[in-house]
Image (cartoon, helix red, strand yellow):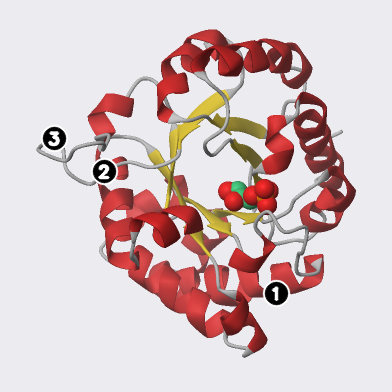
């Protein structure tokens, strides 16, 4: 079963709308020829319309960084799935920064993912353990439980359109990472095998699973050479044209596409 690799840049709270459009203007000609890999950028909400218009007609796809689970309502500051429809293909849910600073729980992440799917958006469900959980050797148990909770009630037919991002909290923005083998082991045991227990082996084999956390040009090849790692969710290195382009090139090479 061959899965199409997916490299996504999570810009977090960086770039004004005009900076974002300038950035993708440089990115489009560099990324366009690199086919075989899905290339996704996830700008802040306000930059989405401009970025989306700019990449239209190019192979670059756009994602949002979060979405509310309600269709509309009195939810000051939030964005509903229908508001993103037509502007983005993907939406990250459960990013650790949203869990940490906005109190997101697995239950909410599950509601967000279901609402996204209902609106025809593809969720990138982010999971990952704290440094304490990692040090206690509880990573697989913890991440496995996150997967079960985040996928609760998600029907079989929706599973193949979901991407999972494994991002150890202690690796985000720190320059620290698990080894590529270790990341692959966790992804296989705690994510793919748990999905297989929920949906069957065939369905689990179709789900793309990204590694995220201090992904840089110098470690990308190692991660992407692992059999269960299908891409990367990239923060800091996605804010530089050259680095992001290099990451996509390395993904292609590692997966035998270049
Ligand atoms: P960094 O690549 O900056 O460590 O961020 C990872 C991340 O949180 C992507 O969602």
Give whichever of discs 1 and 3 has the lower sequence position. Answer: 3
The spot of residue 112 in percent (x, y) is 29, 50
Question: Disc 3 designates what residue?
Answer: 72
Q: CA distance from mark 1 to mark 3?
A: 40 Å
Give whichever of discs 2 and 1 has the lower sequence position. Answer: 2
Q: Is residue 5 visible?
A: no
The spot of residue 153 in percent (x, y) is 25, 63
Image quadrant of residue 70?
top left
At 38% across and 72% down in the image, what residue appears?
148
Q: Is residue 88 above or below residue 152?
A: above
Question: Disc 2 designates what residue?
Answer: 68
Q: Nearer the viewer, residue 233 or 132?
A: 132
The answer as to whether callout 1 falls within 8 Å of ligand 1 is no
At 25% across and 55% down in the image, what residue appears?
111
Tag in front: 2 or 1: 2
Q: Which mark is residue 34?
A: none
At 82% across and 55% down in the image, what residue appears?
225
Circle 2 sits in a helix, a strand or a loop, which is it? loop
Q: Is residue 108 left or right of residue 256?
A: left
Q: Nearer the viewer, residue 236 or 108?
A: 236
Q: How many marks?
A: 3
Question: Disc 1 designates what residue?
Answer: 185
The spot of residue 90 in percent (x, y) is 45, 36
**Which corner quadrant holds the C terminus?**
top right
The spot of residue 40 in percent (x, y) is 59, 32
Q: CA distance from mark 3 to mark 2?
A: 9 Å
Circle 3 sits in a helix, a strand or a loop, which is it? loop
Tag in front: 1 or 3: 3
Q: CA distance from mark 2 to mark 1?
A: 32 Å
At 57% across and 83% down in the image, what residue appears?
133
Q: Is residue 234 visible?
A: yes
């Amino acid at each position: 079963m061959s899965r199409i690799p997916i490299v996504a840049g999570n810009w977090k709270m960086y770039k004004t709308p005009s900076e974002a459009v300038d950035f993708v203007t440089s990115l489009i000609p560099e990324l366009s020829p690199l086919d075989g890999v899905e290339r996704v950028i996830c700008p802040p909400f306000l930059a989405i319309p401009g970025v989306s218009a700019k990449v239209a007609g190019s192979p670059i796809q756009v994602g949002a960084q979060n979405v509310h689970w309600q269709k509309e309502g009195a939810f000051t500051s939030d964005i509903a799935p229908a508001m993103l429809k037509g502007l983005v293909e993907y939406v990250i849910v459960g990013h650790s920064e949203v869990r940490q600073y906005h109190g997101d729980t697995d239950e909410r992440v599950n509601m967000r993912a279901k609402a996204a799917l209902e609106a025809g958006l593809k969720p990138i469900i982010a999971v990952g353990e704290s440094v304490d959980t990692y040090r206690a050797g509880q990573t697989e148990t913890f991440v496995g439980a996150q997967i079960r909770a985040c996928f609760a009630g998600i029907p079989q037919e929706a599973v193949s359109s979901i991407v999972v991002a494994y991002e150890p909290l202690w690796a985000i923005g720190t320059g620290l990472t698990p080894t590529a083998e270790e990341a692959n082991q966790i992804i296989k045991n705690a994510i793919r095998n748990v999905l297989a227990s929920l949906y069957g082996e065939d369905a689990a084999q179709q789900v793309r699973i990204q590694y995220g956390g201090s992904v840089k040009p110098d470690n990308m090849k190692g991660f992407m050479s692992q059999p269960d790692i299908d891409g990367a969710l990239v923060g800091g290195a996605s804010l530089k044209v050259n680095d992001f382009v290099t990451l996509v090139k390395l993904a292609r090479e590692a997966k035998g596409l270049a």
